[in-house]
């Protein structure tokens, strides 16, 4: 394979300043670009979109260590691979890609190590192809060694970059900073990881997007009062479409449409493209000395993070365009909290992707749109005869520039002062994923608490200003009571006097007991009938030829507590009826069921054993009779692998069909992308085994692949895409209809747990223990209960 330029030049590229994380990001960009093209093409994609980064181990010296970046993208042909590793080559379409510069790959790899192997394969290829770029061996002929490796599965696809003979200093940094690398990449790709189905893994740990800990969309403050009062939201969406322009596909220059050639390079390959500034500006829930400012993104990747340029006004009338810092001034000792996320896909960036081209007019126009032309500070604007700054950032500055604790500026407090250290600790829990800190409710509660305590304090001051007035509430507080507590309990003077006039509680209790004693057994049974419902699964004939038979109707208590003739609670009451009939009342609220997990059938059998032993005058022991009754009357409770597996398969087939229908209502690729290579092969094999060979080429175009996917893929896709199947679509459990993250996880975990048990039994070929069979049988029942009712 011919590559250019020479090894000497490639080695020089390794001296270009790129941080270690930037080198990894350059290789990640290429994979994400491939994923983005798959999404734009609407191509069904099995296996998801995953990039994995492996770092050098502490136990291996640098000369033997490797950095590996692999993805499961489409892979490349030999010709595409040759162009991709050739320094100076870049795609014709540089406007929709993260990987802007053709030398990015060569710079990143040469900076990390002296030998790079690139292996790639496409679905259906018979082998992996690749190239080895060894900076110590490539001569003036520019030839790099070709590589071919066999494939174990023709469905494998993707690209793998292996970098070895690592630079000692950079290898040491990568060894020690896996967590830092994940955090940096999580911030850099936060929008992509949050809004696209892409996954990035470093050392086997998934990189999570670093989301902004901001106030919710519905929070606001009121600026001014009376007729001049203005509501200023804590979140302002930005979406400004600019006039379309023509972009030069050769040099990247933007210009006004209608010209025949590029103004900069005179090339004629021009493309009319959209220009749009979009995203949001908002307010962080806490103040921070470093982490505040605006993030600017290009094609989803953050170019600038926590950028504070918009907080400085450049005075065009001052000598040399003097800069005037405007935020934070009043909050400088605690930091700032104005934040944002702005997409500028049309603005050019530097080759290191760590800054925009600030001299470009598209950058300057974006800055003016977001922060306005004049000062943010109202007094300064008025002094220089600028109009009031009505830009999005100007509004946020006006409403949130001060650090006034309470509702005026959305600053949490303790009734007397702000609690900045505590809110920063809460922010740490937000970023750690603690479900109790994902919404802004805890911060809002602290704001409301401060306001309430502040009002109480003012009320106390008014009361204490009149020494003749008795401080009754202070006494009640000292005793641990409050007027609110007394109102709830009903223990006010009026209620007490009413109680005294009606007699004491003992006499009332006594009259109630006397009334209950007077109820006959027949009346009590009739009351139990009215307050119970039939349990079909336990309503059947129990018995055996030598013991006789009883037709038992099992009923579950819904309201009244089940008690015996002496008023003592009981879990099961068996009442004989006419002929060979009986009614079994079951109170599932009793301790033996709720605390100890006893099955209702077990207690019914014990009651029946005692009754049938007497009726048949049998010499069998109660335990012998229970064993006979279970074998003859409850055969479905037997732990038979065949019966439990049959029930599991039947339920799973119904779920497959329902999930298939749910997927067809949306985008089938959302579910299809979660098939990994092994699952794809198994699905294809199952279809071939069923004689559906011609349909294998249509895999992923609709939800039908779920009918043939491996059983354990069903809980996997449910857990990955709960919005497709919860909230009554397939399973009745709530998900999107609840706002609490912990409630969502609980609802989803319940269903996925049952589904995993059922799917595992169906997919197993070998034997299984009695405990697991019992668990799966229960899961079948519970999963059936979780199924949503079908419409129509």
Image (cartoon, grey):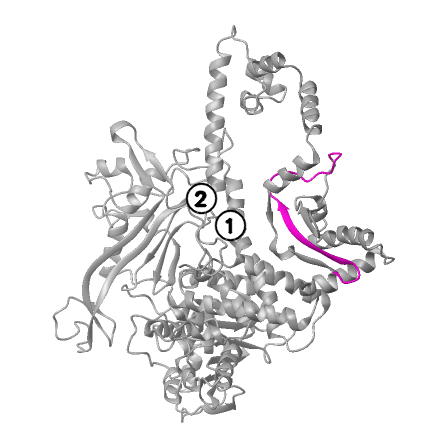
Q: Which residue lies furthest to the right in this view?
A: 619
Q: Position of residue 295 (x, y in %)?
A: 37, 56
Which residue position is annotated with label 1?
A: 430
Q: Is residue 315 above or below residue 204?
A: above
Q: Is residue 521 left or right of residue 666?
A: right
Q: Earlier in the sequence, mark 2 or mark 1?
A: 2
Q: In this view, does 450 lie to the left or right of 605?
A: left
Which residue position is annotated with label 2?
A: 285
Which quarter of the rendered picture does the N terminus lie within?
bottom left
Q: Residue furthest top?
A: 468
Q: Nearer the viewer, residue 70 or 593?
A: 593
Q: Position of residue 47 (x, y in %)?
A: 47, 74
Q: Which of 228 and 781 is in front in this view?
A: 781
Q: Nearer the viewer, residue 408 or 104?
A: 408
Q: Give the range drawn in magenta.
A: 544-567
Q: Position of residue 503 (x, y in %)?
A: 65, 14
Residue 8 can be seen in this image: yes
């Amino acid at each position: 394979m011919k590559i250019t330029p020479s090894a000497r030049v490639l080695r020089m590229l390794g001296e270009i300043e790129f941080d270690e994380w930037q080198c990894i990001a350059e290789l990640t960009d290429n994979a994400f670009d491939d994923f983005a093209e798959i999404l734009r093409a609407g191509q069904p994609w099995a296996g998801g979109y995953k990039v994995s980064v492996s770092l050098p181990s502490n136990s291996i010296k640098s000369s033997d260590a490797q950095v590996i970046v692999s993805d499961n993208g489409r892979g490349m042909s030999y010709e595409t691979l040759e162009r991709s590793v050739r320094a100076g080559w870049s795609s014709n379409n540089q406007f929709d890609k993260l990987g802007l510069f053709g030398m990015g790959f060569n710079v990143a790899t040469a900076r990390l190590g002296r030998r790079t192997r690139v292996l790639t394969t496409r679905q259906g290829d018979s082998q992996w192809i690749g190239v080895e770029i060894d900076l110590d061996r490539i001569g003036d002929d520019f030839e790099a060694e070709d590589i071919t490796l066999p494939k174990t599965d023709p469905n494998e696809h993707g690209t793998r970059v292996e970098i070895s003979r690592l630079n000692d200093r950079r290898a040491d940094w990568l060894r020690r900073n896996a967590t830092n690398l994940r955090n940096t990449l999580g911030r850099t790709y936060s929008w992509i990881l949050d809004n696209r189905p892409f996954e990035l893994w470093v050392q086997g740990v998934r990189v999570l997007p670093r989301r902004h800990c901001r106030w919710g969309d519905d929070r606001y403050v009121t600026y001014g009062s009376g007729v001049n009062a203005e509501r200023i939201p804590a979140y302002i969406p930005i979406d400004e479409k600019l006039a379309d322009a023509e972009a030069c596909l050769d040099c990247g220059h933007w210009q006004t449409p209608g010209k025949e050639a590029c103004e900069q390079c005179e090339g004629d390959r021009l493309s009319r493209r959209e220009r749009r500034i979009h995203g949001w500006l908002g307010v962080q829930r806490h103040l921070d000395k470093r982490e505040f400012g605006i993030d600017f993104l290009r094609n989803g990747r953050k170019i600038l993070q926590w950028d504070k340029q918009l907080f400085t006004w450049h005075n065009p009338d001052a000598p040399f365009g003097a800069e005037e810092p405007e935020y934070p001034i009043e909050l400088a000792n605690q930091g700032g909290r104005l934040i944002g996320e702005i997409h500028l896909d049309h603005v050019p960036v530097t080759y290191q992707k760590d800054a925009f081209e600030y001299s470009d007019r598209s950058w300057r126009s974006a800055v003016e749109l977001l922060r306005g032309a004049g000062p943010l500070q109202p007094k300064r604007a008025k002094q220089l005869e600028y109009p009031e700054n009505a830009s999005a950032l100007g509004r946020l500055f006006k409403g949130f520039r001060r650090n006034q604790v309470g509702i005026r500026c959305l600053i949490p407090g303790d009734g007397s002062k702000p609690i900045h250290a505590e809110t920063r600790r809460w922010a740490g829990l937000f970023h750690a994923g603690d479900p109790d800190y994902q919404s802004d409710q805890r911060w809002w509660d602290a704001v409301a608490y401060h306001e309430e305590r502040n009002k109480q304090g003012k009320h106390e001051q008014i009361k204490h200003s009149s020494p003749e007035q008795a401080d009754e509430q202070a006494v009640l507080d000292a005793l641990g009571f409050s007027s609110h507590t007394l109102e709830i309990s009903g223990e006010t003077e009026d209620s007490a006097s009413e109680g005294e006039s009606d007699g004491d509680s003992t006499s009332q209790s006594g009259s109630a007991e006397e009334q209950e004693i007077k109820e006959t057994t027949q009346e009590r049974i009739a009351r139990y009938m009215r307050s119970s419902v039939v349990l079909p699964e336990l309503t059947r004939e129990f018995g055996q030829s030598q013991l006789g038979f009883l037709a038992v109707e099992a009923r579950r208590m819904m309201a009244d507590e089940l008690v015996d003739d002496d008023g003592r609670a009981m879990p099961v009451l068996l009442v004989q009826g006419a002929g060979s009939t009986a009614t079994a009342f079951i109170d599932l609220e009793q301790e033996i069921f709720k605390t100890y997990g006893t099955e209702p059938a077990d207690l019914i059998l014990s009651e029946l054993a005692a009754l049938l032993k007497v009726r048949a005058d049998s010499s069998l022991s109660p335990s012998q009779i229970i064993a006979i009754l279970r074998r003859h009357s409850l055969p479905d409770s037997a732990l038979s692998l065949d019966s439990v597996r049959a029930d599991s398969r039947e339920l799973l087939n119904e779920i497959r069909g329902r999930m298939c229908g749910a997927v067809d209502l949306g985008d089938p690729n959302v579910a299809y992308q979660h098939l990994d290579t092994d699952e794809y092969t198994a699905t294809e094999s199952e279809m071939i085994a069923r004689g559906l060979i011609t349909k294998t080429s249509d895999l992923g175009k609709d939800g039908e692949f779920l009918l043939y996917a491996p059983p354990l893929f069903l809980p996997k896709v449910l857990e990955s895409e709960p919005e497709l199947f919860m909230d009554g679509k397939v399973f009745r459990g709530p998900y999107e209809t609840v706002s609490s993250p912990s409630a969502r996880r609980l609802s989803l975990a319940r269903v996925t747990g049952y589904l995993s048990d059922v799917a595992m039994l169906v997919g197993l070929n070998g034997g299984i223990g009695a405990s697991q069979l019992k668990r799966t049988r229960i899961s079948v029942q519970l999963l059936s209960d979780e199924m949503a009712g079908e419409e129509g």
